[in-house]
């Protein structure tokens, strides 16, 4: 089982210009393989090892939610209470004369109708904002403020901003800084000894950490970005610790003695709360903190920070699963392939085991799509081809990079928007389920 996995990953590191990777595989909750390949930083010889720290990116979210469920179990929080009743440092703002009610269930299932999908992070040495500054969107925060603009509970909309609301609520209710609270509630009880919500990363850990790399395999300036949005993107960890978390969730689900939360809450976590209309992979619903597939029998989450890509997936009934972490912007291609190979070798039920091919669009097609367009009545849109993607300037906005998703579709990381190529070489802009034809001007 898993023969040749390392060799295949090493080939993918070279193909996708990703310097390093680390992984762990479980069966019946027990680790059956740990592995690592490549280097901490391009141009250096220091190898990635099983102890190398990677940014967990959005995999921070289900871990934060699981910790929150421990406080629900203790009666300190209620999944269905208006969070404004417990928030003291910040409040979910009103929308005009309407004050939306947002609950922890909404926040944990990305159904709160809140804005701000993700965060770009902060370069080394930059001033880091507080959670309240992030939520208000004021300097030195580099994202807009978080507010409700959809009716809570009606649909899925991924919101890292909503997870920062959860972070602030946990601190307000307990009076404990988030990193210390998560260490007490989750990391130490699960034996996740390598993990920490430390932003910026303490200098004494720098030699253990992988450097982030761009899509061309070049080190990111300052080695990595810092993410004060701790619950949304701030965890440093290893694949071994991630599968320990997955095992902890399963222990709670089956009611094992010593589990961190009750079986009832664990089952809530792995019960679909909201469907995903356009899933990017085999997960088609949100539970509490985790993406779900096959009615909740499979759970997991991906992660994407600047220069880091990772994924964790596990099966609640069989205890099978894997975590793969990389230190390159093209790491999602490697992760997809590695997970598919593991699924095939380990006989995961219902998992698509086709090894994904890297989806590319020819430069000729991209150049043909470049040009100046009108979007709606008056907004102009300048599109240029750039390194296998589309760089788009909407009116006077800063440029957004739309990377290929396959099938002629391009998605921007920081907004919930998409561009789609038409059969005649034109473009359609898609946002919130609405399609707008892009009228070519030049």
Image (spheres, rainbow, N blue to C red):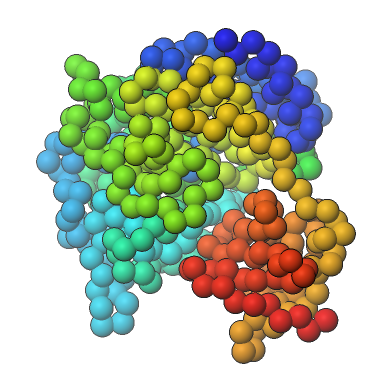
View extreme (left): residue: 75
Q: Is residue 95 above or below residue 6?
A: below
Q: Quadrant of the N terminus?
A: top right
View extreme (right): residue: 364
Left or right, residue 171 beside residue 194: left
Q: Quadrant of the C terminus?
A: bottom right
Q: Which residue corresponds to the image point at 14% horizontal and 36% vertical from the top-left?
A: 74
Q: Is residue 115 above or below residue 167?
A: below
Q: Position of residue 330 (x, y in %)?
A: 69, 40
Q: Position of residue 258 (x, y in %)?
A: 21, 18
Q: Position of residue 23 (x, y in %)?
A: 57, 22
Q: Is residue 204 visible?
A: no
Q: Which residue corresponds to the image point at 67% horizontal and 51% vertical from the top-left?
A: 406
Q: Position of residue 156 (x, y in %)?
A: 39, 57
View extreme (front): residue: 423
Quarter occupied by residue 127: bottom right
Q: Is residue 33 above or below residue 244?
A: above
Q: Which residue corresponds to the image point at 49% horizontal and 50% vertical from the top-left?
A: 279
View extreme (bottom): residue: 377
Quarter occupied by residue 381: bottom right
Q: Is residue 94 visible?
A: yes
Left or right, residue 198 beside residue 96: right
Residue 174 or 298: which is nearer the viewer? 298
Q: Which residue corresponds to the image point at 57% horizontal and 68% vertical from the top-left?
A: 430
Marker count (numbered): 0
Residue 318 or 247: which is nearer the viewer? 318
Quarter occupied by residue 365: bottom right
């Amino acid at each position: 089982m898993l023969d040749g996995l390392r060799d295949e990953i090493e080939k993918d590191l070279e193909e996708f210009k990703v310097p390093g990777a680390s992984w762990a595989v479980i069966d019946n909750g027990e680790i059956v393989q740990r592995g690592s390949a490549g280097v901490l930083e391009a141009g250096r010889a220091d190898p990635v090892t099983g102890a190398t720290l990677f940014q967990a990116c959005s995999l921070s979210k289900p871990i934060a939610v699981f910790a929150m469920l421990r406080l629900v179990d203790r009666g300190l929080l209620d999944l269905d209470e208006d969070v404004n009743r417990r928030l003291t440092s910040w409040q979910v703002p009103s929308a005009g004369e309407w004050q939306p009610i947002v609950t922890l269930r909404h926040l944990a299932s990305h159904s709160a109708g809140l804005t701000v999908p993700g965060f770009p992070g902060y370069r080394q040495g930059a001033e880091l904002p507080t959670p309240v500054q992030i939520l208000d969107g004021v300097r030195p925060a580099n994202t807009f403020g978080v507010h409700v603009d959809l009716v809570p509970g009606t649909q899925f909309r991924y919101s890292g901003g909503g997870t920062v609301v959860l972070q602030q609520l946990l601190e307000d209710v307990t009076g404990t800084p988030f990193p210390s609270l998560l260490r007490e509630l989750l990391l130490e009880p699960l034996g996740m000894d390598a993990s920490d919500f430390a932003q910026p990363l303490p200098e004494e850990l720098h030699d253990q950490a992988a450097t982030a790399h761009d899509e061309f395999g070049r080190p990111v300036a300052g080695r990595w970005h810092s993410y004060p949005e701790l619950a949304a993107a701030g965890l440093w960890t290893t694949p071994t610790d991630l599968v320990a978390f997955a095992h902890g969730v399963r222990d709670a689900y089956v009611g094992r003695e010593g589990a961190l939360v009750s079986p009832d809450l664990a089952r809530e976590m792995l019960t679909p709360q909201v469907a995903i209309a356009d899933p990017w992979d085999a997960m088609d619903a949100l539970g509490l903190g985790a993406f779900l597939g096959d009615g909740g029998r499979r759970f997991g989450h991906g992660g994407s920070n600047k220069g880091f890509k990772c994924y964790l997936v596990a099966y609640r009934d069989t205890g099978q699963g894997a975590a793969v972490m990389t230190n390159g912007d093209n790491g999602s291609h490697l992760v997809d392939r590695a997970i598919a190979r593991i699924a095939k070798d380990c006989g995961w039920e219902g998992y698509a085991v086709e090894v994904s091919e890297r989806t590319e669009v020819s430069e000729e097609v991209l150049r043909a799509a470049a040009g100046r367009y009108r979007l709606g009545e008056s907004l102009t849109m300048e599109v240029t081809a750039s390194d296998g993607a589309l760089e788009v300037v909407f009116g006077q906005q800063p440029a957004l990079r739309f990377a290929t998703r396959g099938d002629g579709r391009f998605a921007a990381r920081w907004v919930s928007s998409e561009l789609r190529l038409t059969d005649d070489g034109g473009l359609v802009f898609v946002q919130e389920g609405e399609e707008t034809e892009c009228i070519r001007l030049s």
